[in-house]
Image: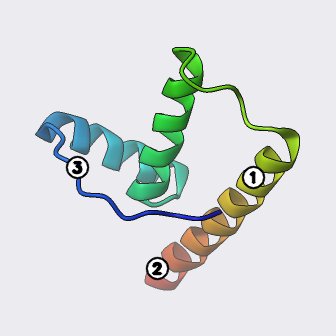
Amino acid sequence: MATRKVTLSLDAAAVEFAERAAKQHGISLSSWLSKAARREAVRTGHQRPARTADAEELAAADEAERTAAEAELRAEG
């Protein structure tokens, strides 16, 4: 999936919550925030859910990132 680098300003508590959630899910903060933004856009009706092919691509990317995060955590001990 294509990514785009952006600069955001978030309140300190929101960042702390997001960092904890990302760590618990074994993914990067960027990935967690991207998923949260996507879910919120769909929930509030501003975006239709992803087509099946898009969802499969997203799931594969998520799985690859989770696997890499687990390997990194194991390497750190």
Give the image location of residue 10, x and y in percent: 18, 41
How many numbered discs, if any?
A: 3
Q: Residue 12's image quarter?
A: top left
First in residue order: circle 3 vs circle 2? 3
Q: Are marks 1 and 3 in contact (CB under 8 Å)?
A: no
Depth check, front residue: 75 or 37: 37
Give the image location of residue 74, x and y in percent: 55, 77
Give the image location of residue 1, x and y in percent: 65, 63
Q: Residue 33's image quarter?
A: top left
Residue occupied by mark 1:
59
Residue at 59% x, 24% y is 42
C-alpha span from label 3 to label 2: 32 Å
Which residue ends up furthest to the bottom in the rendered image?
75
Q: Element at badge 3?
A: loop
First in residue order: circle 1 vs circle 2? 1
In the picture, measured across the screen, residue 39 lies left or right of residue 16, that is: right
Residue at 62% x, 63% y is 66
Residue occupied by mark 3:
8
Residue at 32% x, 49% y is 19
